[in-house]
Amino acid sequence: MSVDERLPREFFARPSVEVAPELLGRHLSYGGVTLRLTELEAYAGEIDPGSHAFRGMTPRTQPMFGPAGFTYVYFTYGHHWCVNLVAGEVGTAAAVLVRAGEVVAGHDLVRSRRGPVRERDWARGPGRLGQALAMGREQTGLDFCRPPLGEPIDLVVSAGEPVEAADVRVGPRVGVSGPGGDGARYPWRFWVDGEPSVSAYRPGVVRKRR
DNA sequence: ATACCGATTGGCT
DNA sequence: GCCAATCGGTATC
């Protein structure tokens, strides 16, 4: 497989927990910017209290139940757009949250969007990453597995350089606890050891079941 | 119709 | 380390 070959839909049509770690080191390109992915988190449906889809399908979470290979972009805390890559089979809620990356192309674009912050902070955290890529509401439902259309706005996830297993780190997801704190028990956060672009860990807040 | 909350970030102590 | 900002989604009445 050549380095820039697009990952096929079959790659994503598996449980998000399998897909997420294998995305480390891969390239995500959109609108003239390319990131080397350094941090991802897996989210699932019914069994995962930390998932938006835990309580079933809603208009917002519908993409998570759909076919793999499409984006699910959500808005949070009144400010931030976070990018997910939908995984799994149709009818199952599964997605991979893209939490951080290293900019490998499109430096000028990202610099203009992120302002005077250190380069390692350009896409360090899901909100910053969304800003670096200029992705928002309009970018939900993009098909990143279809044949390339040749448009510069096309979203591509390509092979890049998969990370050695010894360099993959695993731990609890950031800011997630879910009802009773159960969301934190899943070690579904994956990152590249020693990468400065990986976001800081913050524990989730325990919530009561409603 | 209304109230509550968040898969975060940046600024201040 | 702590906390306000800010608003769409979701649940509840």
Image (tube, coloured by chain):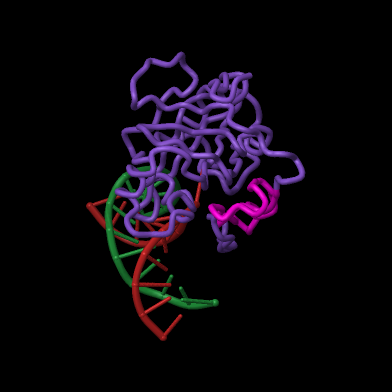
Chain colours: A purple, B red, C green
How many numbered discs?
A: 0
Q: Quadrant of the N terminus of chain A?
A: top right
Q: Which residue lies furthest to the right in this view?
A: A166
Q: Is residue A197 magenta?
A: yes
Q: Main secondary structure of the magenta part?
A: loop
Q: Is residue A143 above or below residue A207?
A: above
| x 54%, y 27%: residue | A158
Percent position of residue A45, x then y: 59, 37
Vertical side of B3 occupied by A154: above or below:
above
Percent coordinates x, y for residue A182 in the rendering: 66, 54
Taking the spot 34% from the left edge, 20% from the top edge, the residue there is A151
Foreground pick, A80 / A39: A39
Q: Residue drawn 39% across and 43% down?
A: A107
Q: Does the magenta stretch include residue A184?
A: yes
**Which residue is at a point 59% across and 41% down the rendered structure image?**
A43
Q: Is residue A11 above or below residue A172?
A: above
- Residue A169 spot, x, y in % from top left: 70, 49
Residue A46 drawn at (x, y percent): 61, 38
Magenta residues span A169-198
